[in-house]
Image (cartoon, rainbow, N blue to C red):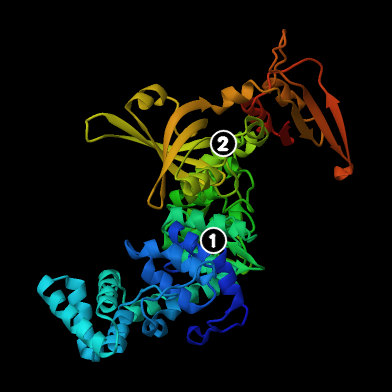
Amino acid sequence: AQRGIHIDLAQLPFDDPATYAMLARGETVGVFQVESVGMRKALVEMKADRIEDLIALVALYRPGPMDNIPTYCRRKLGLEDPTYLHPGMEPYLRETHGIIVYQEQVMQVAQALSGYSLGEADLLRRAMGKKIKAEMDAQRDRFVKGAIENKIKKETASEIFDLLAKFADYGFNKSHAAAYAVVAFQTAYLKANYPVEFLAASMTLDMGNTDKLSEFRRDAERLGIKVERPAINQSGVEFDVADGKIFYALGAIKGVGRAAVESLVAARQVAGPFRDLADLARRIDTRLVNRRTLEALIAAGALDELEADRARAVAALDGMLALSNRTRDEAAAGQFDLLGGGVVQEAFRIPQVEPWAPAEKLKREHEAVGFFLSGHPLDDYEHVLKRLRVQRYADFSQTVRVNGTGVGKVAVSVIDKSERRTKSGSKMGIVNLSDPSGQFEAVLFSEGLMRYRDLLEPGRALVLRLSAVLDGEEVRPRIEDVEVLDDLASRQKQDLLIYLRDDKAVPSIAERIRPRGEASRSDGKVSIVMILDDGAQEVEIELPGKYPVSQQVANAVRAAPGVVSVELR
């Protein structure tokens, strides 16, 4: 609607090349009926290029018939010739390359080869589905007799009956499959031709499901679509689209409540964007927008444009709520002049507080959003992870899907851990983990749980050795070994670069780094990089001696007031 495009789903062209190209790549996150890993794999193998392929896939993708999917794909691509027990079967099975897929095909073959009426053919279908011996024997006699009258050999007729009986048990109603396939095509068409709008609408549909939101967000990134963090002056209650980007919904932030964000968006629409925290405080209704709401908005980054330091924003909450209440009281008393003067125009002082460490900032963001949106706790370890040659979980799981099993090392951040008893009475651990490619669960059993329980605490950065097997469409990872990522990183020689615009931060930096009297082999250099002339030039000054350089030291320095950025290399 924003782009002035009206789409009539009933008029979509079933020969759209972009849609079939997307399906052939298996890019079906959010596409009705064909989202599963198995469906994606089948679409890639099939190279679907017509609606009939989608109808057949819907009918075949069930226990039993799905064994015929590889044959269907080979025959469709011309790698194998279709076979028919009798030429008279070809007109009815040509569409599905000689494979009996639909109940209607069973009925059509019986009509053509054995002279069944339409009513008789339906009775045949029902008898084959029930597998009652007396009915089947009667139907076999009727089928073979009719086939012989059509000059088909008795042996061939019996063989055809057996083939029909085998597939009739699995046969799917084509009209039912077609209805599903049409909706699958319609959603695929929308994603292929309007991916930004499609993903935004899908995220709004699943606004309460953080796992799905995370999946859609990763899919958007893969497609080169930017998902902007929630922002108080840009985001709507639901997911919005502008300039080819998706703006994260305020209503998708945990703990805010729809009524609260609706009131915020309404206030913005009435009087324009919020200018600062004081302006926000004067314009909110604390009966709807309470401390919990504001804390969640801050943690999710929705107030970053009003106060970039989230720790300062949280520290300002007492002042904001007090100002908001005074504003409401004054409004109730009618104490306003034409310019809106009076008590409500006062501001408040924000207490001086230390900024949150990057890990703390991301932890709170995860709690508010349900996944890491603006970054990931492992981002700071990128250079170390390259040296350690660990995999991303998405790559590891893909290997398992191909091979059916696998072993590999994956760096993770622990989200949560629970324990339960197995049927045998022993304890097992279920650990919710995250890396930059997504979230997943892994298990470990009694011996491993006893050995690694203390390491598997929320917030810890670890390197895991995983084993996994493919169970149906699900990868089932098991934790075999656990190492602390900081311990591994400390054994790697690292240098620290600290970027400054002036020397005001130097005393704070000096408190956070300490040179060693006797250098260790894992110690590194520390350099101050001065940014001069508004970034036109940089001057690097290496500090004398060796320093214990680690991610914790880097995080501590990054939190020092006046530090522009910190880099490990």
Where does residue 71 sit, x and y in percent of width and height? 44, 65
Quadrant of the image occupied by residue 19: bottom right
- Figure quadrant of the C terminus: top right
Disc number placed over residue 359 in the picture, else none = 2
Is residue 192 positioned above or below 41 on the image? below
Q: CA distance from mark 2 to mark 1?
A: 32 Å
Residue depicted at 47% across the width and 63% down the height: 42
Q: Element type at marker 2? A: helix
Q: Is residue 169 above or below residue 220?
A: below
- Amino acid at circle 2: Ala
Q: Residue furthest left?
A: 134
Q: Which quadrant: the N terminus?
A: bottom right
Query: Which x, y percent locates residue 234?
Result: 60, 63
The x, y position of residue 362, in whole percent, is 55, 41
Mark nearer the N terminus (2 vs 1)? 1
Quick one: label 1, few (<14), some, or many (20+) residues within 10 Å? Answer: many
Residue 551 placed where, x, y %? 63, 28
Front residue (pair 40, 213):
40
Question: Can you tell which mark lies on residue 105?
Answer: none
Crowd band around label 2 with a 10 angstrom C-alpha radius: few (<14), some (14–19), many (20+): some
Identified at 70% across, 33% down, the residue is: 561
Amino acid under label 1? Answer: Arg
- Location of residue 260 with respect to 533 vertically, above or below: below
**Left or right of residue 257, residue 114 in this image:** left
The residue tagged with tag 1: helix, strand or loop? helix
Q: Are marks 2 and 1 in contact (CB under 8 Å)?
A: no
Relative placement, left or right, of 270 versus 168 is right
Question: Can residue 63 be seen from the camera position used here?
Answer: yes
The residue pinned by badge 1 equals 283
Q: Residue at x 46, y 52 (%)?
A: 293
